[in-house]
Image: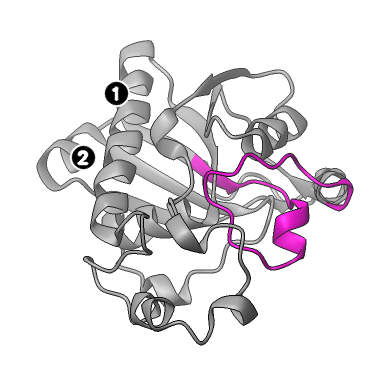
Amino acid sequence: MKGYRISLIRHGQTIANERGIYIGRTDYPLSEKGRSELAAKLDEFEYPKVQRVYSSPLRRCMETAEILFPYRELLTVSDLQEMDFGDFEGKDVSTLIDREDYKQWLKGGLKARPPKGESMEELCVRTYKALHEVIMDMMNEGITHSAVVTHAGIITNMLSCFGLPKMDRREIVCAPGEGFEIMVTAKMWQQSQAFEILGLTPYTKDEEDPFTE
């Protein structure tokens, strides 16, 4: 059965990331450090040869996509935007740590949400919509391998909600400019809303693509 491979990649760093600030919908560009780190990764690692790139419409993702995949068609998907942190947006942990609403949010659960923000349940529904849009476009256009450049929260949610084998979201680590390779078939997605987690991306330059059959 035909498989569709997707490289999920987190955007490079911004000033807000460097300062440890929650940023969801605030449209920060990449920082100079973020750009230099991505350039260093391009020198050290091999990124997959994809046919199309899908990106969050926020600048930090689009700029990352243009650096890592400069010669590939770039399409934006609105539902790939980061979680809406509501009243926590623009604040760091030290500012929030004594707030009761922050403590309750950290306890987790599908219904937990920042004040005026997005719940995990809503995020799960939105990431499903984003993945479905990407997968359907790939199938309709005959694309077998694409990249999705998005945010750590979105990647974590995708893997923990739809990935096989199952992963605990608390154990998922996704560094800037890095991510995971996944594979989905039409049957898996239509019947189970699931995909297979293949492994990490990018890979070292001295090895061939480890996920190519």
- Name the side, left or right, on which 128 lies relative to 63: left
**Compared with residue 174, is residue 187 higher up or lower down, i.e. above or below?**
above
Disc 1/disc 2 C-alpha distance (Å) = 10 Å
Is there a contact, CB below 8 Å, between mark 1 and mark 2?
Answer: no
Task: Say which residue appears at 35% left-offset and 70% top-offset.
Answer: 167
Q: What residue is shown with label 1?
A: 136
Q: Is residue 43 magenta?
A: no
Task: Say which residue appears at 54% left-offset and 29% top-offset.
Answer: 57
Q: Is residue 23 magenta?
A: yes
Q: What residue is shown with label 2?
A: 189
- The x and y percentages for residue 116 are 36, 55
- The x and y percentages for residue 105 are 36, 74
Task: Say which residue appears at 82% left-offset and 47% top-offset.
Answer: 31
Q: Can residue 48 be spotted in the picture? A: no
In the image, the segment drawn in magenta is: 7-33
Task: Say which residue appears at 54% left-offset and 49% top-offset.
Answer: 151
For mark 1, give the secondary structure.
helix
Q: Name the kind of residue labelled 1 in the image.
A: Met
Give the quarter of the image for residue 170: bottom left
